[in-house]
Amino acid sequence: MSPEPVRVGRKRPLPSCPNPLFLLWLTEMRDHAKEKGLKTQYVYQKAINSLKKYPLPLKNGKEAKILQNFGDGICKILDERLQKYYRENGKVESSSKDPSREGETNMVGNEKGGKKKREYVPQKRSGGYAVLLTLYRHSQLPGSKGFMFKNELQTEAQSLCDKSFTVPEPGSKYTAWSSVSTLIQKDLLLKTHNPARYSLTELGLALAERLESGERGRNDGQEEQERSEAEDSGDRPVTVVLTVDEDKDDEHEGEDSCSTSEAPTTAVTETRAEIIGPSSGLSRKCQASAPVGEYLLPGSYDIVLCVDFIETTGGNTARKQELVKELQRNGITFDIRKLNVGDFLWVAREKVTPVPGQLRPPVAKELVLDYIIERKRMDDLCGSIMDGRFREQKFRLKRCGLHKPIYLVEECGLAAAHMSLPESTLQQAIVNTQVVDGFFVKRVQDVKESAAYLTVMTRYLQKLYQNCTLFCHSRELEGNGDFEVENGVTERENPRCSLISFTEFNYGAVKNKCQTVRDVFARQLMQISGISGDKAAAILEHYSTVSSLMKAYAQCATEAEGEKLLSSIKYGKLKRNLGPALSRTIYQLYCTRGPLS
């Protein structure tokens, strides 16, 4: 007979916690504290760890005081919960039955009359609640990506949450975004890629559907009644509590408490259909590219000039402050903020009114108009040409997603005569910017004229967009929401109305963000003398990475064939050939093993 196989490892599984009810209640208190950003979550976690190590059943909370990290407060709470549990189950306080076994019975399931294990449901208008609903609604939109980035998720979810997603409450370092870690831990949310992309798991989708159905299930009468009750009670948030032994009536109340006062998506669709008429001049593509509910009606927004903070601080502070004073003197509403590309742009900012009982007003939607200005003094232009910033800035302006880039050049009078480059070189660079790169170039004499031009542009855009309904689209969507002018209507009569949000614009324009292999390859190519952004983009259409280009070079039979590999690639609007000279330079750069001659 063959010998019996040797069993390696534990012969019996580790016993479960002998006090599952206490463990369950402590876990609930920890999750609740974590969701609110309270430091007591760490106290409850330490108590949970001690309870898991204790091998004997406990009859009440006082007995738990012998354990480490169990103080008078936690023991008192456990006793109160235990007494409530006894009362609701028809037991007396002196019952000798072990409560731990009763807890195990309740947590098994419905087979022997017990009840299901308590499910995690985020508190109404908390961070987790807002994130789940926002991701679910976004997934139901036509053309949805199936995920959202952090910035756009925070912006869209803010209206569904009482706490800020970016600014912590006074005396706390936690924001509403802190609850995202709980959603990931509960397997309700999935975080992938870099930059991070957030999407719902199957469990999260099911929970979000229930929350959404609870919101849509209320009729108008119930909404009015709940609003009046909220006003009487001081607009306090409602907590959804699902206990182990919850009655059916409590479950219905929990479903009702998950509702919100926002209108259903169907109502938004009907309203939007009324807004867009055949005489509005908007193209069908513009209508399709905007998600349902993402729009600003005429009169519901202000056109605001945004000024990069670099234009007001550092360097010659007196000269920079002169620009601010001129804008204030001209009565222009402007906002100083950090712009990752460009010096000036305009946003359509939603008009919002403060909510009674809330410290901060609701977060206003901001859509970026299609105009962006890069301001250059002659001395700054000279320096940027010499250190290579000039070409990089133009390349980034082309890729920022706005279609009307403007170069504002200040001549500076006699100061332009004392430069490191000849004046003819600077003038040629300005002409190339307008003719070759397609930028609009506006020349002014000094800071006062720059402020005057910004004033005139602001008032022009306010008049241009005063009767327009603005739709928000994402650059991630196919086609980037390009606007098509129908029937020869000019830009002056029919401006571009499908715009991107400021958050997405500024995040996409970050200079040193995580780059793909394709982006790094493009930056490498643009370091070669004679290769512009258009030429680099044309090469990338055929060979998106260095690896694919090297494979193509390896398949060439002779060196001469490799040098001419890229010469016939078309670039630019005129579809000219890249040429043999640049093709030979690129071949030598990537295929020469020794130093370049």
Image: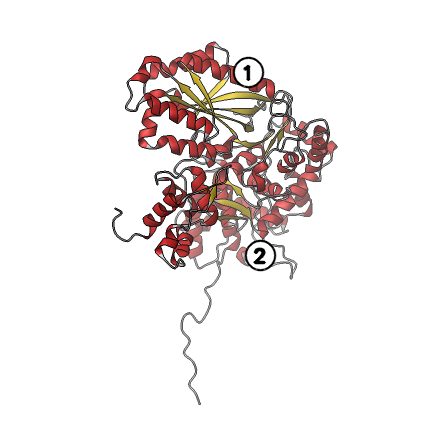
Residue 197 in percent (x, y) is at 50, 45
The label on residue 581 is: none
Give the residue number, with chain letter if any, for mark 1: 459
Foreground: disc 1 or disc 2: 1
Identity, as a three-letter code, of the amino acid under mark 2: Met
Distance, label 1 to label 2, CA atoms, is 66 Å
Which residue is depicted at the point 36% across and 31% down?
A: 389
Residue 45 in percent (x, y) is at 44, 47
Asked whether, in this view, residue 331 is left or right of residue 254, the answer is left
Give the residue number, with chain letter if any, for mark 2: 107
Asked whether, in this view, residue 591 is left or right of residue 116, the answer is left
Which residue is depicted at the point 25% across and 52% down?
A: 594
The number of numbered badges drawn on the structure is: 2
Q: Is residue 164 visible?
A: no
The image quadrant that residue 301 belongs to is: top right
Identity, as a three-letter code, of the amino acid under mark 1: Arg
Q: 156 above or below 105?
A: above
